[in-house]
Image (tube, rainbow, N blue to C red):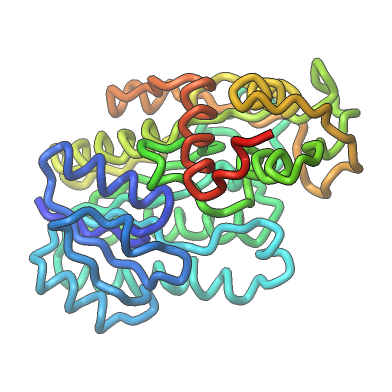
């Protein structure tokens, strides 16, 4: 099969491309390069520069490369930005998906994997989030991901398109330093940035109803996330008409304070964190149950917290060598 991977020049997308090609699949990257980096695309993998809002461009790419499956990762993904700018988020994440699905179904492409997010759950009051946990997103970003799931599943039901919606939890780490996350929007790179400035990392609130008072999250290595896409792609190919919605996490909660302590051990930068007020909308605990992914895909996360932080730190040092100096 040949898989069109939208957003394949991005952080997670580049890892998915790598995993798919290593699994023997043919890949084509479709990316507008607004945040993606062309150098992340491996040699021998075609890169089509375009927006998912451009239906004609998408249709040509599907036809030119005889695409038989799509993995859709292209999206805007900053929660705070989505609150301030909801219209671009709905345009890119929902309308872009609609245009893409229109082209996919017109071309008769049989399989579609959708990049969703744990943000669809909002602030769940449960120890472990299952796929049956009510979805109550708290940001326009989360809303667009939930609307995207609805659109994907409805299209599959109406047309016979095989679909998988993968709800990622907190992604970190890198397969290689050159594939590391270059954004500073998640906890790990945010802590790295502060340490590089010789400033204490920040904890947003330490009065949550958790063991140490800080938020608890489920962190998963980006390599494991990429392998979940390979497993989902293979599952759809072997079962036409299938519809899957799956959590992609480790099922292990780590508090923000614990994460900062782990980062200090790996980096050698031991600066006590400062406590600042809570951020609006941060739930106390969001940890996945990944049992369904294990059952449906025979997939389970393999990498631990040390792997995530160490690989992410090596990637950070590649771009910020000064961070390794005291």
Q: In front: 189, or 303?
A: 189
Relative height, residue 102 to residue 322 (above, below): below
Residue that sits furthest to the front in the current view = 326
Q: In front: 78, or 67?
A: 78
Give the side of residue 166 with respect to residue 56, left or right. right
Q: Residue at x 55, y 44 (%)?
A: 321
Give the side of residue 89 with respect to residue 84, left or right. left
Quarter assignment of residue 273: top right
Q: Residue at x 66, y 56 (%)?
A: 79
Residue 27 x, y percent position in the rendering: 17, 54
Q: Residue at x 83, y 49 (%)?
A: 280
On-image quarter of the C terminus: top right
Residue 325 x, y percent position in the rendering: 63, 36
Asked if residue 96 can be seen in this view, the reply is: yes
Asked if residue 134 can be seen in this view, the reply is: no
Quarter assignment of residue 128: top right
Relative height, residue 305 to residue 275 (above, below): above
Relative height, residue 81 to residue 257 (above, below): below
Give the side of residue 316 with respect to residue 30, left or right. right
Q: Residue at x 35, y 59 (%)?
A: 9
């Amino acid at each position: 099969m040949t898989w069109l991977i939208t957003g394949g020049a991005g952080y997670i997308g580049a890892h998915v491309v790598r995993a798919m090609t290593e699994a023997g699949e043919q890949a084509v990257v479709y990316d507008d390069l607004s945040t993606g980096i062309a150098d992340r695309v491996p040699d021998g993998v075609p890169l089509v520069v375009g927006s998912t809002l451009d239906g004609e461009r998408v249709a040509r790419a599907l036809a030119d490369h005889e695409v038989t499956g799509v993995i859709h990762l292209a999206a805007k993904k900053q929660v705070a930005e989505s609150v301030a700018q909801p219209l671009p988020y709905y345009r890119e994440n929902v309308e872009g998906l609609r245009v893409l699905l229109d082209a996919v179904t017109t071309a008769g492409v049989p399989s579609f994997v959708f990049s969703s997010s744990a943000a669809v759950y909002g602030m769940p009051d449960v120890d472990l989030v299952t796929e049956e946990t009510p979805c109550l997103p708290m940001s326009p970003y989360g809303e667009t991901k939930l609307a995207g799931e609805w659109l994907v599943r409805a299209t599959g039901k109406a047309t016979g398109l095989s679909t998988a919606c993968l709800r990622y939890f907190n992604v970190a780490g890198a397969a290689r330093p050159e594939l590391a996350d270059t954004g500073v929007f998640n906890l790990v790179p945010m802590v790295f940035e502060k340490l590089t400035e010789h400033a204490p990392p920040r904890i947003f609130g330490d009065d949550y109803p958790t063991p140490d008072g800080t938020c608890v999250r489920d962190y998963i290595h980006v390599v494991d996330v990429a392998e979940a896409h390979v497993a989902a792609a293979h599952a759809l190919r072997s079962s036409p008409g299938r519809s899957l919605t799956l959590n992609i996490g480790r099922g292990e909660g780590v508090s923000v304070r614990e994460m900062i302590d782990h980062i200090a051990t790996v980096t050698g930068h031991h600066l006590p964190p400062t406590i600042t007020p809570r951020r609006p909308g941060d739930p106390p605990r969001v940890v996945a149950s990944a049992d369904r992914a294990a059952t449906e895909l025979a997939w389970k996360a393999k990498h631990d917290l040390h792997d995530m932080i160490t690989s992410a730190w090596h990637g950070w040092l590649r771009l910020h060598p000064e961070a390794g100096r005291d």
